[in-house]
Amino acid sequence: METNFSPIENYPFLSPFIFTENPEELEVHKEALLKQLEEVWRPLAIDSCQSMEYLTAREKVFAGVIEEYYREQYKKIVESSLCTNNSFDTLSKNTRLLDSIIHTAFEYGFADLQILKERIKEDLKKELLFKKRSLPKKKKKLGLSRTQIEKVESNPEDPDQRQMLKYYESIEAELIHEIENLSERLKELEELLPQVQKSEIKLNLLLNHLVVFARGGYGRAELSFASDRDLGYCLDTQQLSAGESEICRQFIIHIEHLLREAGIETAHQYFELNEDLSRFKDPSVIHTIPSILESRVLIGSKDLANALKRRFFQILPYETFVLSQIRDYNDRTVPDLSQMNLKEDRGGLRSLQIPLWLSAATFGIFPSQTAEMLALLIQKRIISPRQGYKLCQALEFLYDLRNFSASAKEYHFDDEARESGLSEKDIQSNIINDATERLYLLKKKRFQSIDDFDRYRLQMVNHIQDLSQAILQRLLDRTIVRTFSNFQVVVHLGKRLIVEVNALEGLPQVPISLIFNDPTALLELFEYVGQSEYDLSFELKDEMADLIRIITPDVISSNRTQIAKSFTKLMLTPFTANAWRIMLEICEPINAESQPRTLIGCFIPETNKMRFLLRNLAYHQHPVCVHTLNALDRTQKELDRLKKDYQELYQYLEPKHILALKWGILFHDVGKIDPQTDHEVSGTSIAVNALERIGYDDQELFTLVSLLIVHHTTVVQLSRTSAYFDQALQSFFEIADRNLINVILLFLCNISDYISVSESNAHSTRGLRTFFEETYRVFAEMRSSKLQEDSMDFIQTYLDIKKNDLESDTRIDLLINKSLRENIESVLLTPLKKINKEERKLLGKSEDDLQVLWRDLKLGSLDKQGTDQTTDKF
């Protein structure tokens, strides 16, 4: 990976969009700030012997000086942004301002390093003393627990004693774990304290083994008024002693604390050069990698920064990264003509950033600025110079709008804006809409008319939409080779298509029928399809139909154990439905009995009969096979939604539960292949037999799958019985056997099936979701309650409490409204005194606050949110 790239001199028209480092100017700002800090600090004359008080005082001085300086300078930048037609000038000024404050915090904090070291020693000594006291107590508790275990073990037949044994054994295991951790930490502390004592951190040592860098938009020197202030720290602990490393870590924390106290909130990440970075391969956090690779060094060792970048580039999973970014790109919302999210919508800033990240990953070059990346694309003939300039123009304008929208409320919305009929609540950061557009035209004289503004804006958005798509198409018009246990696949990235399957390199090339004569190898291919969401080319699907005659029941039977393991891996992929769809599409011509034979039918013959089977068309919009695959696809979306909206619930689901859910969904309508039976009942035996046939032997799995098949519409029906809500809740609990995991799985199964039935169902899920939310609330209270009531009694109690709360809230609301019509004294205060003098006396302490809230409500000038909040306080 190249870490230095500068072809910008070949394309001078990109120069206005380049950030130029200016060390001399940075030094002037930093020295002026440090001088100002010293002038405020010197008269305080605080004794450094009291390290905690000394550092606290230093932090207060830093906060006061820097906060005021930053506010003044930021205001100047905002004001100057109205007078420039190149927003990159504003981005550069904002970037340099933050750079100067980071540098100042570093030097100011370094002056405190000796005092910080003393505090570290004090903290380590306290921790050592505490842990030395704790260890004997833990060991004593462990001895008592073991004594209790011996007593309980003497009477193993008693059920209560068996329960007690489990309890004490869990305590024993927990104490053993705590004692091991305590002992290990004590050993570390005893080694660490003397090392901290003798460590002397000189500035050169720090600058050679630490790097502070800017990430994201700040790293690209495109720090808009709406941008996050993303920082990174990397420490080369291999070249430092344990004591030096600890002091450096605490120094980093000290810098962050100084910035936070001054109102400079940063999103920071800390790395050690030798740490395991493999966690960043996960699709959910893979976006961290490009933010490191395009980062910009602020302070410290550039060699260390480049070493960190190389390590991140080495672990970047190219294909996974491409797929995640393409999905992200395709998921962008198409903006309205009159309103747009400047960062997130299609044609916004992120729409261009995604192809640029993919370009950098493809070419192994990560310039830290967008214009440099565009220069690289021009050099590689991905875009023309004219197209590169168009993109820079578009970026400049979107950043101008983003800066304006982020600063509009605080700096631009004034009496002139109000008199023009604008409403402050319509102004939102990162959003361009009618209100922001009108305010922009009022305050900034860049365009003569609203038509000029709209024409230019839509043209710039169109440039990004078209050219970002073109970059992706040209960039991804290539194939990659992926190697598996005994075969290779050739993938066309742009088409997201597997175009070839070959034997391993170096082996004789043979037909697909020989490559996949082992069914587990075939399932390995479809596991990859389930992970990647690739399709297979038409030619490949046709060729793979030959496998249907080869994968016989005898072949399945002889490989049952491995097939079950392979199916489990396939079912746990995020795009399981895609793999099943392809296996259902691969088929032979219809035979004499008019029975279709599919590739998935080789493993589960019942699925052949589901292909294009029509049932209940008055309700179902699709054939059974299509509906089932849609439901399976929806299941993954609902799992993702659960993870996002109900993290505390999602954590209960283990892979075995997700496996049962997906098998349950896959088989939920399989009983319909026999029209003479109740499919919700007959489907269970078909499913269990099918699972046993492909090697599963897990009674818990069979029970869960059967539960989901039998009740795949039950929760939908219960959610519609609002008149008998208490009975519906009780039924749901009893069906789920009062098991939270069953409650979650039944809901996911029902809503996935329901949405996949028809378009109208997909838009009418509110009742079902509300029923689940209410069920979860009641269930959570049942589990936390110590009352041993049956479920119906508990539900009745819960609903009674809700009813009483509603009545109480209504009465209070009526009283408040009456007081607003009349007055607070006669409606609330005088009656309260008659009812309860003590309460009236207590209220007297906060009567002034009450009067202020009442006046705010009386004036009626608050918006709905403000009215609700003020009413709650009242």
Image (cartoon, helix red, strand yellow):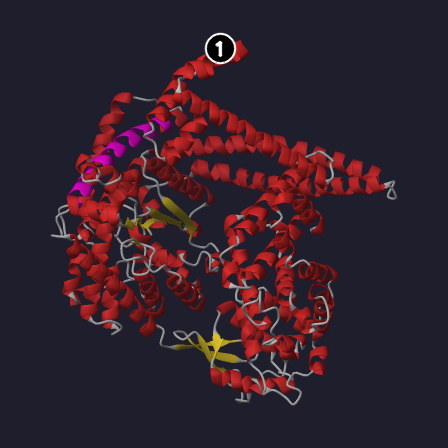
Res. 505 visible in picture: no
Q: Amino acid at mark 1?
A: Lys
> Mark 1 — residue?
841
Q: Quadrant of residue 246?
A: top left
- Residue 129 painted magenta: no
Frontmost residue, 31 versus 723:
723
What quarter of the picture does the C terminus occupy?
top left
Badge 1: residue crowd in 10 Å (few <14, some 14–19, many ≥20):
few
Look at the magenta stretch and give its main secondary structure: helix
- Residue 464 x %, y %: 27, 63
Q: What kind of element bears circle 1?
A: helix
In screen coordinates, is 192 left or right of 513? left
Is residue 64 at least partly visible in the picture? Answer: yes
Q: Which is nearer the eye, 619 or 331? A: 619
Q: Is residue 45 above or below residue 446?
A: above
- Up the image or down, 814 lies above or below 15; here it is above
Q: Which region of the structure is painted magenta?
A: 56-81
Residue 381 % position (x, y):
25, 74
Does the magenta run of residues contain 67? yes
Q: Residue at left 53%, top 65%?
A: 633
